[in-house]
Amino acid sequence: FAIGSGPARALGSSEKLFDELDYRDKAASAVLVLEADRPPPPALVEQVAKACKLAPDRLTFIYAPTSSLAGTVQIAARCLEVALHKAHELHFPLDHIVDGIATAPLPPPQPDFV
């Protein structure tokens, strides 16, 4: 349906990366930000709730089209995440990284997303 980011990923994701990093969150509620132009369908809400071991009303979904200002910010904000993921894939010891900063251009919102 959409690319998602936020605390719900660390709470209920089946991504191998979270196991490799030995990182999981425990929380009574969760948030997931979606790159989407519409709300998630009920079946997806149920699926995420089940994975997070939460009731659906304990989840907050925020959705933003990639062509919107919020969507472009979300995409640009991932540049540090992508760099850290690459370092992990190259087997660089992530515990040696003590700080990080990244910059990325922020394009203006576009009404006609291709």
Image (cartoon, rainbow, N blue to C red):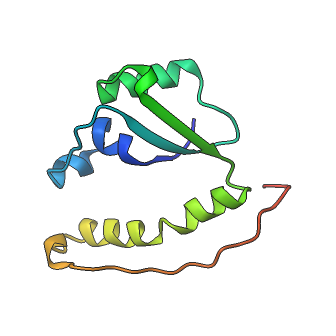
Q: Quadrant of the C terminus?
A: bottom right
Residue 13, x across and y down, in percent: 32, 38
Q: Looking at this view, is 2 or 89 the one in front? A: 2
Asked whether, in this view, residue 41 is left or right of residue 12, the answer is right
Total number of numbered discs in the rendering? 0
Residue positioned 24% across, 71% down in the render: 90
Relative height, residue 19 to residue 44 (above, below): below
Q: Quadrant of residue 58?
A: top left
Asked whether, in this view, residue 69 is left or right of residue 89, the answer is right
Residue positioned 47% across, 41% down in the render: 32
Q: Quadrant of residue 46?
A: top left
Residue 56, x across and y down, in percent: 44, 21
The answer to whether any part of residue 44 appears in the image is yes
Q: Quadrant of residue 91?
A: bottom left
Relative height, residue 67 to residue 56 (above, below): below
Q: Looking at this view, is 45 or 20 the one in front? A: 45
Residue positioned 23% across, 43% down in the render: 25
Relative height, residue 49 to residue 61 (above, below): above
Q: Quadrant of the N terminus?
A: top right
Residue 2, x across and y down, in percent: 56, 41
Asked whether, in this view, residue 20 is left or right of residue 71, the answer is left
Asked whether, in this view, residue 12 is left or right of residue 40, the answer is left
The answer to whether any part of residue 14 appears in the image is no
Relative height, residue 46 to residue 81 (above, below): above
